[in-house]
Amino acid sequence: MQDRVFGFTAISERMCKLRIRGRFFNYSIINVHCPHEEKSDDEKEAFYATLEEVYDGCPRQDVKVIIGDMNARFGREEMYRPTIGPESLHSVTNDNGQRCIDFAASRGMVVRSTYFPRKDIHKATWTSPDQRTKTQIDHVLIDGRFFSDVTHVRTFRGANIDSDHYLVGVDMRSKLSTVFNQRRSRRAPPFNTACLQNGEVAHSYAQQLEANLPGEEELGATSLEDGWSRIRSAIGSAAEATLGSAIRVSRNDWYDDECQRITAEKKAAYDRKLHKATRGNVERYRQARNRQVAVFKLKKRQQEDRD
């Protein structure tokens, strides 16, 4: 999948854009975090002004998808159809919802996450700290002409993602490009350049490079592109012969059996809280989560000290 990603733009702390290469159409996916309902009108208007600018800056032929925390509650009002569907968790649209509907309608988008009949527990995307309030505020918007490309949207409550939001899954029917980014997929491992600090190794590399490099007459008889290709090949072969490849160091050496055990304990506490959100279960999950955070920080610090 990473070979099909050919563009990423960080717009602000509330917004970013990803472009994915498709077979017939490319995809512009905008991830957002809208201001809370209680924020000022000025802040909300500034956010949607930026969103309009980013959306309008996407190539016209791209399939444009907006995902993320809209902090918007959509109701089931007929007057907002077909921008929203009949399957929202809520019955009344709030201010953030109306702003999102206005934006979507002006750009011919639909809030696809309000179209699928599911149980209410699979519609809610956020739960309050006391576990009493559940809302559907994370949504998926797509251009109306590609309405049918989104085939299903639901939350996965069992996925413990260390957040008061639930994981939202989106099924899309799309054809991605089969042409891979060859430059990335064939990238050679880095050379062990650190050993050049050794005088003998540096001298050996210099001799090998001098022997590999083509002469001036040979380079003069070739094109610029072919000449650079020969120089690059000479540098690479000399480095391979004298330096070798750098040893890749795993970044997760700190994750040991203790980390695995405490993660399993936190997952079990989360499942108990999800099954029955009593005060005791909520508190036990909070303690298990804090223990995991503390242990992970300690392990990472110890790993950094060893390095």
Image (cartoon, rainbow, N blue to C red):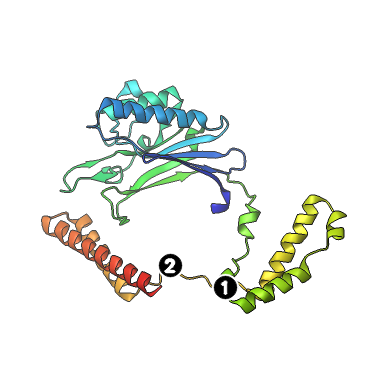
Tell me what residue is drawn at x 49 percent, y 28 percent.
Answer: 56
Residue at the extreme top: 79
Q: Is residue 124 above or below residue 64?
A: below
Residue at the extreme left: 279
Tell me what residue is drawn at x 18 percent, y 62 percent.
Answer: 287
Tell me what residue is drawn at x 26 percent, y 44 percent.
Answer: 126
Q: Is residue 255 above or below residue 271?
A: below
Residue 12: x %, y % from top left: 40, 39
- The Cα–Cα distance between marks 1 and 2, rounded to whole angstroms, is 25 Å
Residue 189: x %, y % from top left: 60, 66
Quarter location, residue 265:
bottom left
The front one of 94 and 199 is 199
| 10 Å crowding of disc 2: few (<14), some (14-19), many (20+) | few
Looking at the figure, which quarter contains the C terminus? bottom left
**Disc 1 target residue:** 197
Q: Secondary structure at mark 1?
A: helix
Kind of residue sitting beneath label 1: Gln
Sooner in the amino-acid sequence: mark 1 or mark 2 = 1
Residue 161: x %, y % from top left: 32, 55
Q: Single out the mark in the foreground, 1 or 2.
A: 1
Left-right relation of 290 to 113: left
Residue 156: x %, y % from top left: 33, 51
Q: Is residue 111 visible?
A: yes
Q: Is residue 210 above or below residue 5?
A: below
Q: Is residue 217 above or below residue 191?
A: above
| 10 Å crowding of disc 1: few (<14), some (14-19), many (20+) | few
Kind of residue sitting beneath label 2: Arg
Tell me what residue is drawn at x 56 percent, y 32 percent.
Answer: 59
Q: Are marks 1 and 2 in contact (CB under 8 Å)?
A: no
Residue at the extreme bottom: 200
**Disc 2 target residue:** 251
